[in-house]
Every structure is written in structure tokens, then in C-alpha cells.
Amino acid sequence: MYYNEKSIFSRMIFSTIADWLFPKECIACQHEGSFLCKKCASEINPSSRNTYKTPYLDRVHVLFSWEDKLVQKIIKKIKFYYAKGLIEDMDSLLKKALEKVEISNAILVPVPLHSRRLKSRGFNQSELLAQKIGQILDLQVQDVLIRIRNTAPQAKLKAADRTQNMQNAFCVKEKFIKVNQKFVIIDDVTSTNSTINECAKCLRKAGFEKIEAICLAKGDIHNRQKKPA
Ligand SMILES: [Zn+2]
């Protein structure tokens, strides 16, 4: 697997101490016990305009609305702070959102991080999300793609530069090339579709034809005012 052992070990120690010093509390109402309490989770509605097509993806399923401020908060916390605990506590919320998503006989493919980024962050939020979604939909998760270029963070670039930034960033692991499979790319958030499109393009080049994606939301993580592209 991807994970850097030292980093995981230090994070485990850190999170045990942190749990003791700072008990888990809901990111919305500060109620103690979980990162997202049942009451706040029940106030989030799955997205109604939830599916669209791109040149490389047969369908992109967006689970929640970016306009919901709590959804934005969840995504930022997942990306930059405590992905695992929060994703675990989103179990019932994800189950509700995934009821609308019809996917079977597919392999879930997390968007990979470059090894250097993974070392510094210690976790890949897309991988953790894929594991959770795989558990709910009873689908396998496989690291089909490798990130071969350490690209600049998409969120720091202008929308027009994001496609260029992602070009040739991924490749398909050789052992998967002969497998005739449907793949579903998993990412936490998409804005211009550049990252998930580049993953899909790479899979299409390798000969795969059925490719979809699931993202929590469609929006720009560094710009609250801007509407999603
Ligand atoms: Zn709450």
C-alpha cells in the first residue's frame, strides 16, 4: 500500500494523545462523541443535480451540494486534517447519498497522490473515501493508477491552468492493463474535472471503455465566493 509507515505510526501516537486531550467533537455543533453528530449529518441532503457526463467520463456522480456550507467544511477537514475519523463518522450520510448511485461490477480507483505528497500528508483522502464507499457498495478498491508527476496543487491554480497542470500526471499499473473492467474514479472534490478527466483519459488510453467517477461535491476549495465551474 501507499502509506508511509513512520508517518502512520507518528499519526497514531498523535491521534491517541489528541483523543485523550481533545475528545472528538462535531465539526458543526461541537457536540462531543464524533466528528459529525447524527443530528448535523441528518441536516445534509444528498445533491439533487447529481450526475453529468464529460468527454472522458460516462458519468460523474456528485453526492452533495457545494452550496451547503457544512459540506464545504467537511471537505476541507477531510483534505487537511482528520480524514479517517471524519469519513468513518459520515457512514450513514454516505449510505443515504449512495442510494441514488447505481453502480455494480466495478472497481473503485482512488485518485493517487504523488509519493512525495503522500509522505508529507501521511494519508490519501481519496483512498480512505474509496475504502468507505467500497464498504457501503460492496465493491473492491484497487490502486490502478500511479501518479508519475508531482503536480502543483490544483486548488492554487487558475481554472484555465488546471487541465495543463494535470496532463500526463498518471499512468495505469501494468498488471491491470489486460483486465476488462469498469472503473469508478473516487475523489473528494472536483472543480473543473481536470483531475478526474486526466485519470479517465489515462484509463481510456490503456483500452478501458467504461469509466465513471464519484466525488463528494463540485466546487472550488480555495474560493468560497466563486460558483463551481
Ligand atoms: Zn453536530
Image: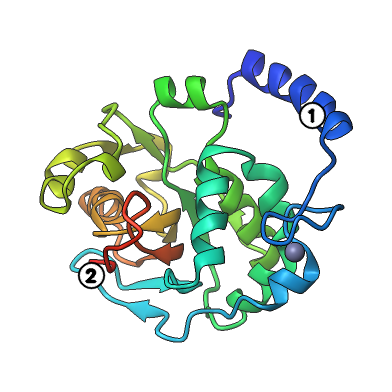
With respect to residue 193, does 13 lie above or below? Answer: above
The amino acid sitting under disc 2 is Thr
- Say which quadrant the C terminus sits in: bottom left
Which disc number belongs to residue 54?
2
Residue 92 image offset from top left, x and y in percent: 74, 70
Viewer-side residue, 194 vs 139: 194
- Of the image marks 2 and 1, the number of the one nearer the N terminus: 1
Q: Residue at x 12, y 45 (%)?
A: 161
Residue density around tag 2, few if under 14, some if 14–19, many if 20 or more, within 10 Å: few
With respect to residue 2, does 124 lie above or below? Answer: below
* Left or right side of 2 for 50: left
With respect to residue 104, does 139 lie above or below? Answer: above
Q: Is residue 191 visible?
A: yes
**Ligand 1 lies in quarter:** bottom right
Q: Residue at x 79, y 29 (%)?
A: 18
Viewer-side residue, 41 vs 128: 41
Residue 202 image offset from top left, x and y in percent: 25, 48
Q: Is residue 142 visible?
A: no
Viewer-side residue, 153 vs 131: 153
Residue 153 image offset from top left, x and y in percent: 30, 36
- Give SS at disc 1: helix
| Quadrant assignment, res 226 | bottom left
Viewer-side residue, 226 vs 74: 226
Most extreme residue toward the bottom is: 48
Q: Which residue is mark 1?
A: 18
- Say which quadrant the N terminus sits in: top right
Residue 85 image offset from top left, x and y in percent: 72, 46
Which-is-in-front pick, marks 2 and 1?
A: 1
Residue density around tag 1, few if under 14, some if 14–19, many if 20 or more, within 10 Å: few
The amino acid sitting under disc 1 is Ala
Which disc number belongs to residue 99?
none
Most extreme residue toward the top is: 6
